[in-house]
Amino acid sequence: MHPGYGFLSENAAFSQALEDHGITFIGPSAEHIRIMGDKITAKETAKELGIPVVPGSDGGVPDYETAQTVAEQIGYPVIIKATAGGGGRGMKVAKNAEELEIAFRTARSEAKAAFGNDEVYIEKYLQKPRHIEIQVFGDGKGKAVHLGERDCSLQRRHQKVFEEAPGPAITPKMRSEIGEICANAVAKINYIGAGTIEFLYEDGKFYFIEMNTRLQVEHPVTEAIFGVDLVREQIRVAAGLPMSFSQQDLEINGHAIEVRINAEKLPNFAPCPGKVRVFHAPGGLGVRMDSALYGGYSIPPYYDSLIGKLIVHGRDRPEALARLKRALGELIIDGIDTSVPLFHMLLAEPDIQNGDYNIHWLEKWLAAQFAE
């Protein structure tokens, strides 16, 4: 059973239930999902496996007094994060000692409400980092490879909107070094299938954030530049077959970009459910549209607002950007509002054209664009 990349893909209980009933889960073991699903355990495991981590608390922080001690040790600014967190919930920044108490208590309160678990931990808050993730793949028998990185720094409320591979700021030497560390780490624990090790990257250094024990929404950009089908590979190793490629076989070809098309209305990004009157997907060389939309489809109000992913591939980054601009111009989704106008605006920005952005860039830009 393939769980896709939704909630069931990282649900250890679901994976275990399938295993108990003799059904093969196309993904990692329940144990690995469990270990990496808890952010504190994941960080401890990453450290043991030789993956660089952000300076921070050793495990959960039980009270405000401990939080003060940890913050003073690692230095401000700091970020408080929910152990069981995700999607930016239970996450607060304290720039100085005066802000720590309210940030700590608010993060715990949000974590309890969202996840039923108020445990939090504290890390050094990096000023202008990029969000870089390394794609890894293991055969479950002690062999693993990495498939380079994706830069997912353009985010709004900790949700990715624009992803590209390879990363504009990552050199081949950096890619090889961090990729080898990650591949060796997952090989040591006999990890099976696709996984993503996420980092904050600043001033030439990588700092582990978390590991996603599943296929990522943005996996198509990796498939494009390496010419591999990650889902096919997941099925192969789940069936007990060897991986169809080795590290030596993996060479980057060109550049790929994905934009997430959401049913949202600018400038407030309010959800926009409703009936799609006309849907026309762009096409042509190097263009891929992943969507279940069709004319007459009604988008329900109950789920995530993601309705499509537009992926382009070119010989280099400028060609990929040009192809993306053309494809966005061809895309028609009539009847509802979408985030497509956002990408037209972004492609006109020099920082985007030059690849000069970080995880705070988009929110600052949005605040300036829609200040009135």
Image (tube, rainbow, N blue to C red):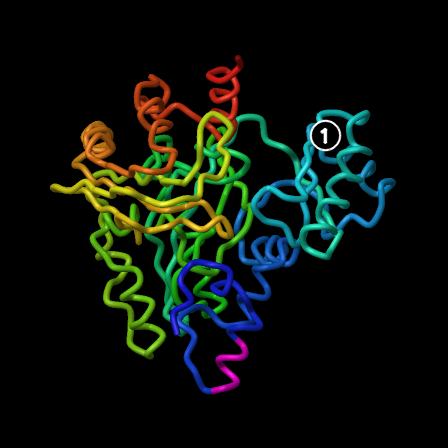
In magenta segment, residue 19: yes
Residue 237 at x, y = what percent? 33, 72
Residue plotted at (24% across, 38% down):
255
Q: Which residue is mark 1?
A: 94
Q: Is residue 284 left or right of residue 260?
A: left
Which residue is located at x 27 percent, y 66 percent? Answer: 232
13 magenta-colored: no
Q: Magenta region: which residues?
A: 16-21
Provide residue 209's location: percent of width, then percent of height.
Answer: 56, 46
Residue at the limit of the structure toward the left, as seen here: 285
- Is any part of residue 176 visible from this angle? no
Label 1: element kind? strand
State whether residue 179 is above or below residue 258: below
Quarter containing the N terminus: bottom left
**Percent of width and height locating residue 150:** 37, 42
The residue lying at 52 percent from left, 27 percent from top is: 360
Would you say 269 lies left or right of 78 here? left
Examine the image and state in which quarter residue 187 appears: bottom left
